[in-house]
């Protein structure tokens, strides 16, 4: 099971947080802070696994993260997940984002966190891995976006501004 | 109204959308909070509007703010509003918001049930998808209960996209509503074989997650997973399955034996590191579960260790880390294999990556032996000196102590050395583990009597030099050490060489700067020392010395009397008064020494840490009963420390006080103290003994001034542990020499007798004797202490509720709640109108007599189950199942009543659910032709017996057991006895068969490991028959119809390598006919072969599955094909080929489908079916065997049986109904058959005839 998926930047600003178990908003922030603290002090070229202290949840849980340019992608998982598998999953996630946003950068995530959530929802559901095939994910995301667009054209036309 | 809409749209134009909000926040860096609060006000205004678009926009912004840590639960109702919008765009926004901030105590969740139900059944798959995704995050027990049935229906949705989501979410539903597990499980199991890989993967995922927590309930699925493992090519699925097997093997070692080979193959063949790693992990688990002694295991271990070494040597830090992690698992059971890689692990201690260093440290723990302990610790001490970060250094320190103290100081041969190591550790700068060192010193000094003199001398020096240390002792935890030192010197003062000097050291004014609890110990032990000193001095004629000592005490103690610490003050003033009194007596020349030392007489023995807990509660004492009624309920329970990510995991891991971090400890301590203080019934501990390990808050508050000592402090006169290493070496050498001498002597003496040679090769563990007789005082335990400690279980674990026996048939009461209008559309069983509900009630009525008996038996079974071992348990299960089969219909309606509008995926499982794990696991050989399979596999009733027969063949110890069981169980069902007798006779015959096969097919045993046998408890399982064979390879195959697709059949082929060479590049090709085609991957031509996805080492077999599309199924047909492969051995490799003919019988298009008698009757009445008949002569077998054979070979199920007459039913993949009426009289069997497709019927009957003519 995946307990949480966090994305934050090099300064610890959250860009996406998805908890698959309920915590109060304060605790969530505290977890993000602590996780950032743990992850950010690690060098590049060290392993991508971290056994979290008490905060992350005991011996069965691990932080598995990847650092891309300005962003950290952190998955908190328990021992039923394969470590290397999750690393691959992060890679799939990022590549999917890259495809969906066309050369994704931090700004995309800042302004379109909802879209990132939608993409993530096609990969991981309720803490369990749903799909790992990137093409399949992109296909479903695109199909849903198309639906959204078709609905937009349904909305009543915006009246002219010169009404006043 | 129109105006309102227009107004809404205009408003929306001016509203901020999410992007504007984000931009705004970025532009207001200084007053972010203020800006956001104005935004929230705006959002509140927006939410008040009627326009759903505006609301959705507001909710979208709220979701963003929630991520920033703002509580948005106040908008929960608006979120529900947006969720129920008919537009997907808004619905998605609503569900996202809900998934981010709804939880079990959100009360508006109640309102969503119907909305979610509506969305789940929406014609738009993405509405359903979004609802499922959202629900997965906020499902509550109520939602789970109300929606379980709807979700279960979705598991058979036509769209794989929905199916996989529905399957995944079932796990969450199970967690919240455990009652749903049993009804839903058959469907879930079906999904393991879903044609869509995504759905399959989801099902594997869910079952793995379930099985991880309650593995024993899922053992019966092992054959199915085994099949998946050998056929799947999806690495995600493979990893999950392999992980699952890792959890199952500890429960069933035989499973492990079966697994080793395919896993080893995977290890050899896979290129995916993740898969390789998991395989290695599971092989390790298998090896751990198997008792050692199997010869080929050392090879497996060697393989694992080798692969891990490659990982550890890899430059990729991740692999290195994982390699070490897995290594530590091997270490537990096979320390020797790991120990040979000590060099590598020590090397990892120098790695720049802290995670890796810590892993390596963990490994060291298990690698020590008496021989190398000193050497390893010496290395670690070097690392301690070099280490930069205090965290890592502290970790080193704890590890050193862990390593040395493990299993009751098992590896320490020289305690003088250990004490000096501890003393050296006290020189660590800034460690926070002073208390740990102290507790070790105390423990060793108390429990190892022989070392006390030495320890006391060391501690005395330590105290003497305390002035050198105290300076930097104060600001770190190391001052705790002086606590231990003082106590040891006081308690064992008889060993002191110069007690007077120590006494003086303990009463130095500087002591007053130590933390209170340590001062207290100083004062108390000064008194003990005083007693000792008096005793030694009173013997002298000169009494002035004794008086001087008293004077010293009287002069120094007032300093402590003024102490701010109550404990110190109290002790000091008591002792001061005592000494003053003693002084008076001394002045009168009264001998007091005896009486003073009587104050401290008696020995303190160590008490085992759990001793208190293990005292059994005396009978009649109810600890939970109130002594006095409690005044109020005010005791707050919120003080329970909340671990942040897991609730359960903290309890799983054994609490080790070392690893708990200081803050947490302090917090807990605080909480406990408060609780204790408020609790009038709590008996406060005596402070001196309890406070030892508690850090005083004072230490942390003292301002820290870092003094950089580049040169490590050396306390004069303290021993260096190194010198002990040398001494120890010398001692051992000496011992060895002596031993040799002795042996020589012995040999000389013995030479005349036997010429046996003693090879005193390399020094073994046992050769090393401890330096002095170590007398480890065992920890005291209360009398009649309870032996077990099962305090690790967490009663709140949600998975506990899921510990449910899944093999038992469903009872009526277990049905999932179904909304009434749904139940009607039910039953897709042949007679469309066969109302499930009535069948359910009718069926038991008919058999009520039998049922009662069964129930009774079951109860007894249950009782027995508890008391008997696993094997016996299984045996009972078989028997139960035999009977369940007959009642199978009882629980089918449950599955049917949910209104599946899909193909015939009725629970085919039931009739064939002779879950015979035992048989699968036992190593009976695969029958090489159909006929014999028929004998072995006479499906239902006799299988249990067959099993025991087979087991008798393969496992010599078992027969007695099973026989005994049989007689026992027969007591409970006298009526069955006759039948059993018959079967026993039958069995004897069968044993013959087995023996026969054993003699002519010795090599067949190995087929087992890679294959799935005909005995598998799978519904669709049938026997394998020979496809083709030559000197290199043998192929057996089996054809099964595809449940989901009426035009597909799956051909499973088992390839067995019969030669000594490696077979590779196998290519399977079939010449397609107009009617039947091999499914080839997209892009390949119609004549291309399919590559078999594995290679075969000598003697190994493996299974591959090929999908064929067929158009017409009314005629049997044969397809010609070839298998090409390369035979590779050391000298050469040759290209070989093997031709074969695949025979698609009409039977292979039939799928075992259960049917109810009334539905069956209606079907026959309908008049759509054409009849045909068949007569078999000379059939010499019991009627039920005949039926079993038809069921098994021709995929029929028994509808009803009366004496020697039975009606049977089956259904083709394209929906043809086939009904049989089988009558037997003497040796003649007549079969009347009806089917809506006469050609097919004719062919099926021919095939049945064929089957029986072969026997």
Image: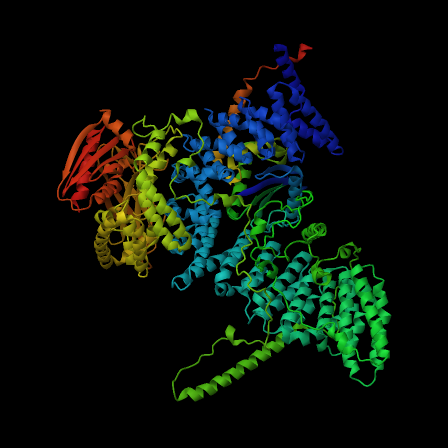
Residue sitting at x 44%, y 31%: B154
Above or below, B1118 against B1001 in this view is: above
State the image coordinates of residue B290 (x, y, percent, origin top left): 42, 59
Q: Is any atom of residue B824 visible in this view? A: yes
Q: Can residue B1090 be seen in this view?
A: no
Q: Nearer the viewer, residue B1234 or B1080?
A: B1234
Residue B492 coordinates in the image, percent (x, y): 70, 74
Residue shown at 56% from the left, 62% from the top:
B785
Task: Using the image, determine if residue B452 lies above or below residue B74.
Answer: below
Q: Is residue B576 above or below residue B351?
A: below
Figure quadrant of residue B1049: top left
Give the quarter of the figure containing the N terminus of chain B. Answer: top right
Residue B1252 falls left or right of residue B382 = left
Is residue B458 depicted above or below B539 in this figure?
above
**Camera-nearest residue between B444 and B599:** B599
* Residue B375: x %, y % from top left: 59, 70
Q: Nearer the viewer, residue B168 or B1027?
A: B168
Residue B253, quarter of picture: bottom left
Q: Is residue B285 left or right of residue A115?
A: left
């Amino acid at each position: 099971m995946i307990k949480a998926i966090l994305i934050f930047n090099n300064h610890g600003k959250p860009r996406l947080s998805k908890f698959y178990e309920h915590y109060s908003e304060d605790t969530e922030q505290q977890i993000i802070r602590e996780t950032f603290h743990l992850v950010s002090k690690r060098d590049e070229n060290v392993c991508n696994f971290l056994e979290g202290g008490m905060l992350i949840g005991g011996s069965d849980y691990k932080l598995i993260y990847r650092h891309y340019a300005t962003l950290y992608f952190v998955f908190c998982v328990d021992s039923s997940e394969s470590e290397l598998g999750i690393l691959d999953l992060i890679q799939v996630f990022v590549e999917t984002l890259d495809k969906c946003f066309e050369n994704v950068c931090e700004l995309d995530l800042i302004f379109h966190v909802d879209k990132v959530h939608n993409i993530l929802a096609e990969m991981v559901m309720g803490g369990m891995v749903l799909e790992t095939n990137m093409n399949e994910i992109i296909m479903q995301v695109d199909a849903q976006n198309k639906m959204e667009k078709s609905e937009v054209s349904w909305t009543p036309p915006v009246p002219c501004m010169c009404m006043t | 109204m129109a105006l309102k809409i227009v107004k809404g749209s205009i408003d929306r134009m001016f509203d901020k959308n999410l992007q504007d909000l984000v931009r705004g926040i970025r532009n207001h860096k200084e007053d972010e909070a203020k800006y956001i609060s104005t935004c929230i006000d705006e959002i509140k205004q927006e939410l008040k509007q009627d326009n759903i678009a505006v609301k959705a926009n507001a909710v979208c912004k709220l979701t963003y703010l929630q991520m920033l840590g703002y509580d948005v639960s106040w908008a929960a109702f608006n979120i529900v509003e947006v969720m129920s919008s008919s537009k997907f765009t808004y619905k998605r926004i609503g569900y996202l918001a809900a998934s981010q901030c709804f939880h079990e105590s959100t009360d508006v969740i109640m309102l969503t049930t119907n909305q979610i139900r509506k969305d789940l059944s929406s014609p738009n798959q993405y509405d359903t998808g979004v609802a499922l995704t959202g629900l997965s995050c906020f499902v509550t027990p109520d939602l789970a209960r109300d929606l379980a049935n709807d979700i279960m229906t979705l598991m058979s949705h036509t769209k794989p996209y929905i199916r996989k989501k529905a399957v995944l979410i079932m796990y969450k539903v199970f967690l919240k509503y455990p009652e749903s597990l049993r009804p839903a499980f058959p469907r879930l199991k079906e999904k393991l074989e879903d044609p869509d890989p995504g759905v399959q993967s989801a099902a594997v995922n869910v079952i793995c997650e379930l099985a991880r927590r309650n593995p024993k309930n899922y053992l019966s699925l092992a054959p199915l997973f085994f099949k998946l493992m050998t056929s799947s090519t999806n690495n995600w699925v493979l990893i999950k399955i392999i992980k699952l097997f890792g959890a199952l093997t500890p429960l069933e070692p035989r499973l492990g034996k079966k697994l080793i080979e395919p896993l080893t193959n995977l290890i050899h063949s896979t290129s995916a590191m993740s898969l390789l790693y998991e395989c290695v992990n599971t092989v390790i688990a298998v090896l751990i579960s198997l008792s050692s002694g199997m010869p080929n295991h050392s090879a497996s271990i060697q393989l694992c260790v080798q692969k891990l070494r490659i990982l550890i040597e890899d430059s990729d830090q991740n692999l290195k880390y994982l390699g070490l992690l897995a290594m530590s698992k091997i270490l537990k059971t096979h320390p020797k294999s790991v120990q040979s890689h000590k060099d590598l692990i020590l090397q990892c201690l120098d790695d720049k990556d802290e995670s890796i260093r810590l892993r390596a440290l963990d490994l060291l723990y298990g690698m020590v032996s008496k021989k190398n302990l000193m050497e390893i610790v010496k290395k670690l001490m070097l690392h301690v000196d070099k280490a930069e970060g205090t965290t890592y250094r502290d970790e080193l320190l704890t590890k050193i102590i862990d390593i040395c103290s493990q299993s009751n100081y098992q590896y320490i041969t020289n305690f003088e050395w250990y004490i000096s190591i501890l003393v050296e550790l006290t020189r660590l700068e800034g460690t926070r583990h002073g208390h740990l060192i102290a507790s070790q010193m105390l423990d060793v000094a108390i429990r190892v009597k022989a070392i006390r003199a030495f320890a006391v001398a060391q501690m005395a020096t330590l105290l003497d030099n305390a002035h050198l240390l105290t300076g930097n002792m104060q600001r770190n935890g190391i001052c705790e050490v002086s606590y231990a030192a003082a106590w040891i010197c006081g308690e064992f003062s008889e060993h002191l060489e110069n007690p007077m000097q120590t006494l003086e050291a303990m009463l130095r004014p500087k002591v007053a700067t130590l933390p209170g609890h340590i001062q207290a110990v100083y004062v108390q032990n000064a008194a003990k020392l005083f007693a000792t000193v008096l005793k030694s001095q009173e013997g002298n004629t000169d009494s002035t010395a004794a008086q001087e000592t008293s004077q010293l005490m009287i002069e120094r103690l007032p300093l402590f009397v003024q102490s701010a610490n109550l404990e110190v003050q109290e002790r000091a003033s008591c002792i001061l008064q005592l000494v003053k009194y003693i002084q008076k007596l001394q002045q009168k020349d009264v001998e007091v020494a005896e009486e003073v030392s009587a104050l401290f007489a008696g020995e303190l023995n160590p008490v085992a840490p759990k001793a208190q807990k293990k005292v059994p509660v005396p009978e009649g004492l109810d600890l939970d009963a109130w002594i006095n009624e409690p005044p109020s309920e005010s005791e707050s329970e919120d003080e329970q420390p909340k671990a942040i990510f897991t609730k359960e995991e903290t309890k799983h891991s054994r609490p080790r006080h070392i690893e708990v971090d200081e803050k947490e400890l302090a917090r807990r301590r605080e909480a406990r103290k408060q609780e204790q203080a408020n609790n009038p019934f709590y008996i406060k501990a005596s402070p001196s003994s309890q406070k030892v390990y508690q850090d005083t808050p004072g230490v942390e508050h003292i301002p820290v001034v870092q003094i950089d000592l580049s040169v490590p402090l050396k306390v004069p006169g303290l021993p260096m542990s190194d010198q002990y290493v040398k001494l120890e070496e010398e001692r051992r050498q000496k011992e060895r020499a002596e031993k040799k001498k002795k042996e020589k002597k012995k040999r000389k003496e013995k030479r005349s007798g036997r010429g046996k040679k003693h090879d005193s090769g390399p020094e073994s563990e046992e050769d090393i004797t401890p330096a002095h007789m170590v007398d480890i005082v065992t920890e005291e335990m209360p009398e009649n202490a309870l032996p077990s400690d099962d305090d690790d279980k967490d009663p709140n674990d949600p998975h506990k509720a899921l510990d449910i026996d899944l093999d038992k048939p469903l009872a009526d009461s277990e049905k999932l709640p179904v909304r009434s209008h749904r139940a009607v559309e039910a039953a897709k069983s042949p007679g469309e109108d066969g109302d499930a509900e009535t069948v359910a009630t009718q069926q038991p009525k008919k058999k009520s007599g039998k049922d009662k008996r069964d129930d009774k038996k079951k109860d007894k079974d249950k009782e027995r189950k508890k008391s008997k071992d696993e094997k016996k348990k299984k045996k009972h299960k078989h028997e139960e199942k035999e009977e369940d089969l007959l009642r199978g219909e009882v629980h089918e309606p449950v599955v049917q009543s949910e209104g599946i509008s899909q193909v015939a995926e009725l629970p085919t499982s039931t009739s064939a659910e002779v879950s015979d794990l035992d048989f699968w696991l036992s190593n009976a050989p695969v029958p090489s032709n159909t006929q014999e399979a028929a004998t072995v596999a006479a499906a239902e009733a006799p299988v249990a017996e067959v099993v025991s027969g087979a087991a008798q063949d393969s496992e010599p110890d078992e027969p007695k057991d099973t026989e005994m069981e049989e007689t026992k169980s027969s007591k409970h069902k006298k009526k069955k006895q006759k039948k059993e007798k018959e079967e026993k006779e039958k069995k004897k015959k069968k044993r013959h068969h087995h023996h026969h096969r054993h003699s002519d097919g010795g090599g067949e045993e190995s087929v087992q490991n890679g294959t799935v046998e005909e005995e598998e408890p799978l519904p669709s399982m049938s026997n394998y028959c020979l496809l083709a064979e030559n000197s290199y390879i043998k192929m057996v195959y089996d054809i099964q119809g595809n449940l989901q697709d009426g035009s597909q059949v799956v051909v499973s082929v088992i390839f067995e390598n019969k030669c000594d060479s490696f077979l590779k590049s196998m290519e399977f090709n079939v010449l397609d006919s107009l009617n039947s085609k091999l499914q080839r991957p997209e892009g390949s031509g119609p004549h291309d072969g399919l590559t078999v996805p594995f290679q075969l080492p000598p003697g190994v077999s493996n299974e591959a599955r090929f999908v064929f599309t067929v158009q017409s199924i009314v005629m049997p047909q044969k397809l010609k094909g070839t298998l090409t492969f390369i035979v590779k051995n050391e000298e050469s490799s040759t290209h070989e080929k093997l031709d074969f003919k695949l025979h698609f019988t009409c039977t292979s298009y039939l799928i075992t489908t259960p049917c109810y008698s009334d539905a069956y009757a209606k079907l026959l009445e309908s008049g759509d079916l054409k009849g045909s008949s068949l007569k078999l002569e000379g059939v010499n077998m019991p009627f039920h065997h005949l039926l079993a054979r038809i069921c098994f070979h021709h995929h029929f199920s028994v509808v009803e049986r009366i004496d020697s007459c039975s009606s049977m039913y089956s259904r083709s993949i394209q929906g043809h109904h086939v009904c049989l009426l089988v009558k037997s009289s003497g040796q003649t069997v007549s079969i009347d058959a009806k089917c809506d497709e006469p050609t097919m019927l004719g062919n099926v009957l021919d095939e049945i005839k064929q089957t029986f003519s072969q026997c």
